[in-house]
Image (cartoon, rainbow, N blue to C red):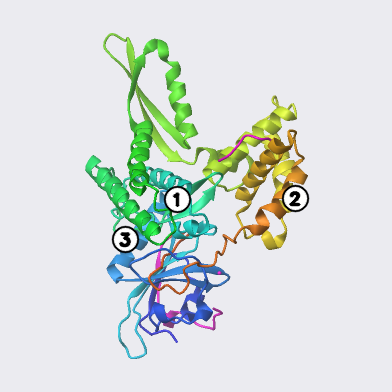
């Protein structure tokens, strides 16, 4: 039975939380409660737990830090930041002898996400590191645009999901984070420099563990975070001057920002006294340009690059069918029914936990393109799908519930994410009555 002093702060209370063994230190929880998922490196004890048909992550931490991180994560979720979504904070824990235990921060596991060490355990390629760095740079820019100072940027504090031929990064650990109206250059530079230092150290650890070849220059890879961050930040925020005869550059700038996945809320345009030159300053409102388009057209909730790939395929389908003059919404409905849904429906049920559906669709298109290149002619989508299932998908690990390659190494912990919330509640067990029961893209067409 839970302690009478136990309190759970949550937006949406799951009574099954009361059935967990809060009187035990998290490191001693019985295996019957635990889920075997990959854990990254953490300063705290973290465990994945089965609860009400889903998987949650529980981290033992000090009370003040837990409440701070819970609130920061809630604020970031309201801002639509790519980060873990908090579920609850559990305080007032005591063991059977009445000794106090650390409180617990609870998040929900983000399906198909992996810590960086699990990715290297599978692939061990320097190209993987480069793609992870690129996605982390995008994440850091997005957070900085929102006014979030991280203070502990690293690969270990990030989760990665496949997004077409790249990765999408999600913030995991926000213990040291702060939200401001706007960050100073010094705050941004500190985050970037810390990211560079931590990444180099983490890659050196991979080399020491034989997960990366010793001849790979990890310092060069680590330096990439600053290079990518600076280039992306400048593209998103820098002012640009040009002559009045080059006004097409306004449209070109907006197009480049869209290609990076960002929408432009407004443009500030100024002319000099002579009227000979113009100066524009974009106001970037949010990332997810392609994601929002595909969501509006099809209702599919997918990654940014996955969405871009789908839109490219949709436009190719539109051209191939001769439907350029029809509303894109009508064509999107037909593309969904004739192209996307048949591919996903063809995947055997026992293989659907291998990858998320949008990633499977992307990889089917890639596989079809390679088949066509080898044969020198087009390959029917049905044949390519069948070939992909047997030649590729059957041999992939399950990324919805990837078994921990470091299981048994107590120093390797970590956690992940997601759920929406309104106002918090704080309740005690005595308030609850009754019993409870303790879960790179090519442009080949898809048809």
Quadrant in which the C terminus appears:
top right
Which residue of the protein is positioned furthest toward the bottom in this rendering?
97
- On-image quarter of the N terminus: bottom left
Badge 1 crowding class, 10 Å Cα cut-off, few under 14, some 14 to 19, many 20 or more, is: many
> Which residue is the site of mark 1?
169
Q: Please determine whether, in this image, residue 419 is positioned above or below residue 188.
A: below
Mark with earlier residue (3, 1):
1
Q: In the figure, 439 relative to 388: above or below?
A: below
Residue 175, label in figure: 3
Q: Whole-percent x and y of residue 256?
A: 46, 29
Depth check, front residue: 206 or 31: 206
Q: Nearer the viewer, mark 3 or mark 1?
A: 1
Q: Which residue is under mark 2?
A: 386
Dot 2: element: helix
State the SS at label 3: loop
Provide the residue span drawn in magenta.
423-447
From where the camera sits, is residue 419 visible? no
Which residue sits at x=34%, y=69%? 44
């Amino acid at each position: 039975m839970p302690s009478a002093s136990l309190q759970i702060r949550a937006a949406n209370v799951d009574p099954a939380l009361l059935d967990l063994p809060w009187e035990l230190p998290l490191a001693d929880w019985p295996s019957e409660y635990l889920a075997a998922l990959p854990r990254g490196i953490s300063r705290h004890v973290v465990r994945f737990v089965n609860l009400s048909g889903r998987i949650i992550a529980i981290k033992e931490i000090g009370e003040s830090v837990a409440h701070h991180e819970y609130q920061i994560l809630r604020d970031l979720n309201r801002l639509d930041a790519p980060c873990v979504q908090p579920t609850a904070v559990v305080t007032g824990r005591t063991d059977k002898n009445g000794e106090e235990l650390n409180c617990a921060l609870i998040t929900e596991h983000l399906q198909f996400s992996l810590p960086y060490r699990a990715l290297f355990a599978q692939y061990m390629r320097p190209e993987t590191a480069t793609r992870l760095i690129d996605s982390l740079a995008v994440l850091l820019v997005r957070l900085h645009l929102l006014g979030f100072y991280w203070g502990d940027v690293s690969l270990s504090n990030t989760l990665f999901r496949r997004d077409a031929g790249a990765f999408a990064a999600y913030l995991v650990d926000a213990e040291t984070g702060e939200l401001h109206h706007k960050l100073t250059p010094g705050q941004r530079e500190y985050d970037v420099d810390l990211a560079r230092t931590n990444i180099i150290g983490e890659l050196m650890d991979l080399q020491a563990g034989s997960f990366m070849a010793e001849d790979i220059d990890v310092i060069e890879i680590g330096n990439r975070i600053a290079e990518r961050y600076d280039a992306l930040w400048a593209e998103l925020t820098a002012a640009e001057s040009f002559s009045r005869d080059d006004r097409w550059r306004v449209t070109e700038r907006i197009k480049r920002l869209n290609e990076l996945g960002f929408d432009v809320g407004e443009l500030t345009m100024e002319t000099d006294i002579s009227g000979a030159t113009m100066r524009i300053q974009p106001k970037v409102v949010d990332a997810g340009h392609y994601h929002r388009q595909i969501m509006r057209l099809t209702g599919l909730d997918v990654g940014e690059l996955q969405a871009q790939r789908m839109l490219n395929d949709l436009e190719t389908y539109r051209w191939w069918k001769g439907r350029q003059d029809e509303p894109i919404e009508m064509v999107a409905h037909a593309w969904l029914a004739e192209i996307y849904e048949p591919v996903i429906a063809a995947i055997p049920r026992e293989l659907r936990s291998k990858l998320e559906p949008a990633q499977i669709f992307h990889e089917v298109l890639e596989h079809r393109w390679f088949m066509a290149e080898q044969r020198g002619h087009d390959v029917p989508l049905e044949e390519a799908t069948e070939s992909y299932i047997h030649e590729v998908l059957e041999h992939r690990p399950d990324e919805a519930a990837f078994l921990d390659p470091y299981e048994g190494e107590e120093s390797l912990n970590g956690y992940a994410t997601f759920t929406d919330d309104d106002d918090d509640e704080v309740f005690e067990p005595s308030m609850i009555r009754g019993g409870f029961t303790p879960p790179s893209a090519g442009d080949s067409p898809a048809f």
